[in-house]
Amino acid sequence: MNLTMNFLSHFPDAKTLLERSSSFSQDPVVADVNGHIHTPFSFSSFDSIPQAFAMAVAEDVKILGINDFYVTDGYAEFYEEALKNKVFPLFNIEFMALQKELQASGIRVNDPNNPGRTYFSGKGLSFPLSFSNDAAQKLLQLKTESNLQTEEMVKRLNHHLKLVNVPIQIDFFTMKNQLARELVRERHIAKALRIAVYELYASDAERKSALTLIFKGKEPKSVLDDVAGIENEIRSALLKTGGPAFVEENDQAFFSLETVKDLIVNGGGIPCYPVLLDDSKGNFTDFEGDWGKMADYLASKGIYSVELIPGRNSQAVLLEFVRFFHSRGFVVLFGTEHNTPDLTPLTIVCRDKKPLSDELKKIGYEGACVVAAHQYCMAKGESGYVDKDGNSKFTQRDEFVKLGRAILSYYFNEFRN
């Protein structure tokens, strides 16, 4: 398969696509979309990228977006699997930025525990990749700093295990080779420790006793066959703030929001703010509590795209929020993340497993259409939804939706790879 040229570059021109799409009246108005999943190239619920696509086919999810932290290493395999399974691929990336002025003011953005820290996504990056040398070096810096932090965490974890007399030592490089790819995350450490405990101790009683020692006298709350629950407890007790293996990130592990936005634009993508929205108690972060101010702030930064992980949110609040931002001209996208040990379905639902309403599905699908149209324009060497200078064509959102629909119609009905 030729990975030096995006299949979209071979699609007909926009006028032809729009004309052809009108003949496919049997197409569903809305296809199921999941625009945000992590893969094993960062940390993922999936064992492999093919597994994610097998689930997409089984659940009839037609559009799937890779969204790993800091890395684009999975793009080539994601591209191959998308074409093989006739699922449309969206090429995305995720960062953690630091807005120091908000940090100084104690304003929590979309990290409920760390003021100023801001998760941020790029949507519809160019494939094949087109980062400049400077941008590529910045990405390498982020990956290197992240791995140095997790390597130090492993050292502190091993020291803690010696202190509590648990005869386990985690080797960072063995863990990296067996459980990760190029990027090692906290969750890899939690998984490695859980595996080591379960391999060393055969019975549930022994495993529980060892975990109680590791947790400094506190028994695990999860049942022992709930490996995701146990790994989450390990992460919370040992690797988070106050834990014996916690390591605070180096300032070099964070760029400003402006730098992250520039990196995304340099890679041909659309800057996109990931919204946390309401938690299980109905609370919002300081930044997200006033939607009008939030929309104005994002617009002032040239950001006209937001994404949500509806599984975190109540259906009613989600609908109200999406209507508000959609009416302001924002592109709205949805995903599931799949960056925890829990392997849940790809089909997007709200909190308490409530399905997305038809209105929400339509808005999310239209958001994916915009990203698809942007990827098409970039593959054709044209200006997309966001141009090379980072300017958004948010006033032309509906035109990009229409073009995206035509692109998807051609992909599902006529394209033969």
Image: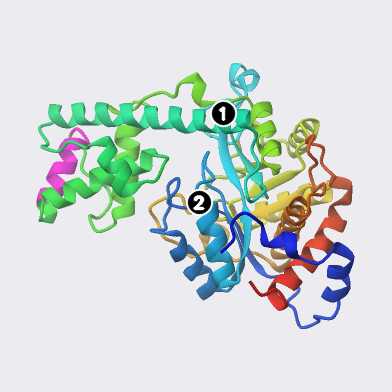
Query: Is 209 inside the magenta-drawn segment?
Result: yes
In the image, the segment drawn in magenta is 206-216
Q: Which residue occupies the extreme top position in the image?
A: 104
- Give the alpha-carbon distance from disc 1 to disc 2, as whole Å: 18 Å
Q: In terms of sequence position, does the residue under pointer 1 or pointer 2 come before the other?
A: 2
Pick the quarter of the image with the C terminus: bottom right
Q: In the rendered image, which quarter is residue 349 located in?
A: bottom right
Q: Please report the residue visible at 54 percent of the width from the left and 63 percent of the height from the top.
A: 80
Determine whether, in the image, residue 132 is placed left or right of residue 234. right
Q: Is residue 233 visible?
A: no
Q: Please report the residue visible at 46 percent of the width from the left and 64 percent of the height from the top.
A: 50
Local secondary structure at mark 2? loop
Q: How many marks?
A: 2
Q: Please report the residue visible at 82 percent of the width from the left and 74 percent of the height from the top.
A: 21
Query: Is 317 inside the magenta-drawn segment?
Result: no
Would you place residue 347 above or below residue 379 in this image?
below
Q: Please report the residue visible at 63 percent of the width from the left and 50 percent of the height from the top.
A: 128
Q: Is residue 15 visible?
A: yes
Residue type, numbered disc 1? Lys
Please give the residue where the numbered disc 2 appears in the rendered image: 74
Please give the residue where the numbered disc 1 appears in the rendered image: 138
Percent position of residue 400, x then y: 83, 56
- Magenta segment's dominant SS is helix
Local secondary structure at mark 1? helix
Would you place residue 346 above or below residue 308 in this image?
below
Determine whether, in the image, residue 368 is placed left or right of residue 329. left
